Image (cartoon, helix red, strand yellow):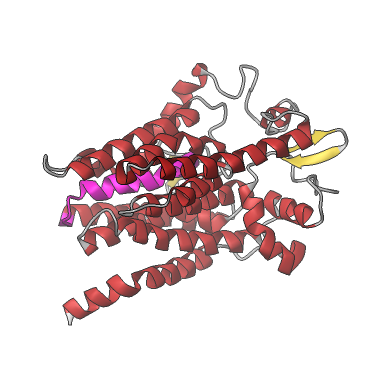
Amino acid sequence: MKAFLARHFQKFGFLYLFLLAFLVYLYSNNGQYMRFNYYTHLAFSFLHGSLSVDNPPVWLTELAHVNGQNYVRFGVAPGLVLMPFVAFFGMDTNEAIVSLLLGALDVALMWWVLGKVVRNQKVRLAGTVLFGFGSVFWFHASYGNSWYFAHVVTTLFLLLALGEVLKEKPLGYWVGFCLAGAALSRYTVILAFPFFAYLLWRKTRSFSQLTFFLLFLFWPLGLNGFYNFLRFGSFNETGYALVENQSGILPFDTSKGLFHWSYFPFNFSVYFLKGPDWLGRFPFFEPNQLGMSLFLTSPAIVYAAKAFGKKEEIEKKVLAGLCWLSVFLLVLPSVFYFYVGWKEFGWRYSLDFMPFLVILTTLGFREKMTPLKTLLVAACVLVNLWGVVYWRLLNW
């Protein structure tokens, strides 16, 4: 019976994990209409043949105002993803519901990706649980405002690209297109380019596949440059600098630019050292709204340090090295950025590299779950449950 159930879950695990994550995320959400819905407005504008947002509500303060027009500065891909929903539901589309729906799909996709990385199904399940319920992905996918929705869509495209490039015979055009989708959700994710380019070449040794990869990566990015030109008269201007220059909108100083080395000490302390705030009364601890240490919210990631396998496991060593390179490259923008975030649980920007970190952690489990590993994954789930419950009770 045990073997039968294991085979059954291996066959239908994708569906079961999608349904489980959807129900958990749905219950975690407060059910209210998400009014911080930049991408819903963007999708609505696209459907009506416009690049600008007409008559935006006053609480959408991070629009770029140029020549009397209001432009969404964020990456375009989440708006494109929302277009079918907005076409059907109009401005009644609840961005948060779409977020938790796609977030649940991301959890199932992580199960699919890890099936190409490890053989042990318990380890595969532990890695999926770590991602979907033991990382800050749970909080941000179930909350669902536009800032968080961008991460959900980024992760969706990243996982699709990972699942393809980890196949025995990956298709370059699909890897490139999915990486473009991720980069057009969160621009910094383009820094994962070396991972996909090298692994695709290693798998195929095909110049044609590499060419297709580059073509299907860069033509969407080129179209995005043209999109920028139509809005701002420059292929390189995304609108970020235009918003930051509107004084008083954001609570952080940008006088040194969006990226600067002087931001590093504070950012590093938040991302790697920061703990919860002490209240002195029940419930005694409260999540710090600027963020908290990645090692606090997902302590099981310490096993990523053991990702390099035995000497004969060359492919896993290569995969681990590429994942570590991607994590390093994707950490850099966060630690030098002027803004760590606001009213969020944990390190939101860590979601840019979370799929790579989960792969590393799963590799570090070395094809075997032990009581300590299980306990650490359970601790990750409890910490993130705390964050979700705290938000629901206090209605941040």
- Outermost residue on the right side: it is 68
Query: What secondary structure prevails in the magenta region?
Result: helix
Q: Is residue 91 left or right of residue 211?
A: right
Is 126 situated above or below 19? above
Residue 204, percent across and down?
33, 46
> Residue at point 38% right, 72% down?
16
Q: Is residue 269 left or right of residue 10?
A: right
Is 90 situated above or below 233? below
Which portion, as a residue range, is magenta? 344-371
Is 58 situated above or below 17? above
Is 12 situated above or below 350? below
How many numbered marks appear? 0
> Residue at point 52% right, 46% down?
182
> Residue at point 50% right, 59% down?
103
Residue 225, percent across and down?
67, 35
> Residue at point 20% right, 80% down?
4
Q: Is residue 331 visible?
A: yes
Q: Nearer the viewer, residue 95 or 324?
A: 324
Specify whether residue 350 is painted magenta: yes
Q: Is residue 278 left or right of residue 375?
A: right
**Which quadrant of the figure contains the N terminus?**
bottom left
Residue 85, percent across and down?
67, 64
Specify whether residue 321 is painted magenta: no
Residue 79, percent across and down?
66, 52
Examine the image and state in which quarter residue 381 appears.
bottom left
Q: Nearer the viewer, residue 239 or 36?
A: 239
